[in-house]
C-alpha cells in the first residue's frame, strides 16, 4: 500500500526539530549528538507506550474509534529508537578502534611550568590501552599520589570515546579527592611524542599548561 506523503510530513518535521535540538544540547553539554537523539527517541517511545490506551478505540483520545490504530506509530518510534542505539554501539566500537595505539608507545613524562619533562626526579609513565579500547592504564616508575588517595604505582581511567589522536578518559570513584568537573579529560596527541590535557568541563580548545612528552621508546 502506498504511503501518503501528507501523513509522513509530521514525522519529518518532528525528526528535523529533534535533530536540531539534539545538536544544540550536545554542544551545551559537550556530549556526542547520538546520545541526545537517543534520549529524545526514548522519551517519544516511552511516552507513547504509557498513554497508548488513550488512543485505542473507546479511549480518552479516541472515544468513537475513528482514529487509526496507534500500534503502527509506536512501531515506527521503536524502530527509530533501536536504530539510534545500534548506530551508537557501532560508532562507539569504531571510535575505540580508530585511535592510533602506536602513539602510546614508550616512556612518558609531563612538563609543568615549562620545565624539562624528562628529568630524573620527575614521574615517568608507560601508557597502556586495553585490547577492547575501553581502559587506559598509567604505569608509574615510582609511587605517586593521585588526587587525595594513597600513593600508587599504577592507576586507570575509562575511555569514554576516541578519535585517531584523541582519548576522552574518565577517572572512577576509586581515585578519591578529584572534583567531579575534573574527572573527565581530553588527552590530545598533537604530534609524535607530545600530548596536551583539557578538562571536559572547559570550553573547546582550552588546554592547561601540562605537556606530555615521550622521553624514550
Image (spheres, helix red, strand yellow):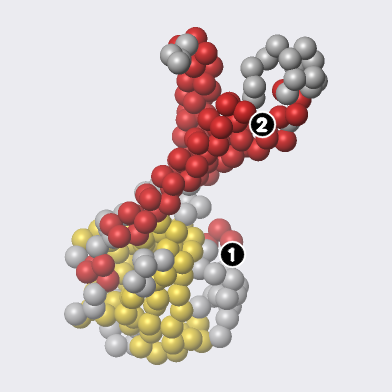
Image position of 49 with respect to 113: above or below = above
Q: Residue 43 carries which label?
A: none
User: Pointers 2 and 1 in contact (CB under 8 A)?
Assistant: no
Q: Is residue 13 visible?
A: no
Helix, strand or loop at mark 1: loop
Question: Residue 205: horizontal and vertical position, in percent?
Answer: 37, 49
Q: Residue at x 38, y 84 (%)?
A: 140
Residue found farthest to the bottom: 142
User: Label 2: few (<14), some or many (≥20) within 10 Å?
Assistant: some
User: Label 1: few (<14), some or many (≥20) within 10 Å?
Assistant: few
Helix, strand or loop at mark 2: helix
Disc 1: which residue: 179
Quadrant in the rendering for residue 103: bottom left
Which of the two residues, 31 or 216, is positioned nearer the viewer here? 31
Image position of 75 with respect to 1: above or below = below
Image position of 132 with respect to 37: above or below = below
Q: How far apart are marks 2 and 1 (CA)?
A: 39 Å
Which of the two residues, 81 or 156, is positioned nearer the viewer here? 81
Question: Residue 160: horizontal and vertical position, in percent?
Answer: 44, 59
Q: Residue 48 carries which label?
A: 2
Q: Which of marks 2 and 1 is in front?
A: 2
Question: Residue 100: horizontal and vertical position, in percent?
Answer: 24, 62
Q: Residue at x 29, y 77 (%)?
A: 108
Q: Residue at x 46, y 66 (%)?
A: 158
Quadrant in the rendering for residue 175: bottom right
Q: Is residue 52 visible?
A: yes
- Quadrant of the image for the N terminus? top left
Query: Which callout, 2 or 1, points at the residue further toward the start of the chain?
Result: 2
- Quadrant of the image for the C terminus? bottom left
| Residue 2 placement, left or right of 71 | left
Q: Residue at x 20, y 80 (%)?
A: 216
| Residue 180 placement, left or right of 163 | right
Amino acid at each position: 500500500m502506498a504511503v501518503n506523503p501528507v501523513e509522513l510530513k509530521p514525522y519529518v518535521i518532528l525528526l528535523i526539530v529533534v535533530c536540531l535540538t539534539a545538536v544544540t544540547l550536545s554542544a551545551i553539554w559537550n556530549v556526542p549528538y547520538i546520545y541526545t537523539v537517543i534520549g529524545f527517541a526514548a522519551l517519544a517511545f516511552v511516552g507513547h507506550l504509557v498513554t497508548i490506551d488513550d488512543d485505542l478505540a473507546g479511549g480518552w483520545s479516541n472515544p468513537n474509534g475513528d482514529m487509526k490504530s496507534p500500534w503502527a506509530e509506536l512501531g515506527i518510534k521503536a524502530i527509530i529508537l533501536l536504530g539510534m542505539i545500534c548506530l551508537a554501539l557501532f560508532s562507539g566500537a569504531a571510535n575505540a578502534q580508530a585511535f592510533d595505539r602506536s602513539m602510546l608507545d614508550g616512556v612518558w613524562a609531563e612538563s609543568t611550568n615549562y620545565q624539562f619533562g624528562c628529568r630524573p626526579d620527575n614521574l615517568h609513565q608507560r601508557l597502556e590501552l586495553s585490547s577492547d579500547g575501553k581502559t587506559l592504564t598509567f604505569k608509574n616508575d615510582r609511587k605517586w599520589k593521585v588526587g587525595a588517595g594513597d600513593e600508587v604505582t599504577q592507576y586507570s581511567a575509562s575511555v569514554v570515546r576516541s578519535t585517531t589522536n584523541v582519548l576522552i578518559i574518565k577517572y572512577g570513584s576509586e581515585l578519591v579527592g578529584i572534583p567531579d568537573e575534573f574527572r573527565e579529560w581530553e588527552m590530545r596527541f598533537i604530534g609524535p611524542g607530545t600530548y596536551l590535557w583539557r578538562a571536559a568541563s572547559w570550553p573547546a580548545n582550552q588546554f592547561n599548561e601540562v605537556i606530555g612528552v615521550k622521553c624514550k621508546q
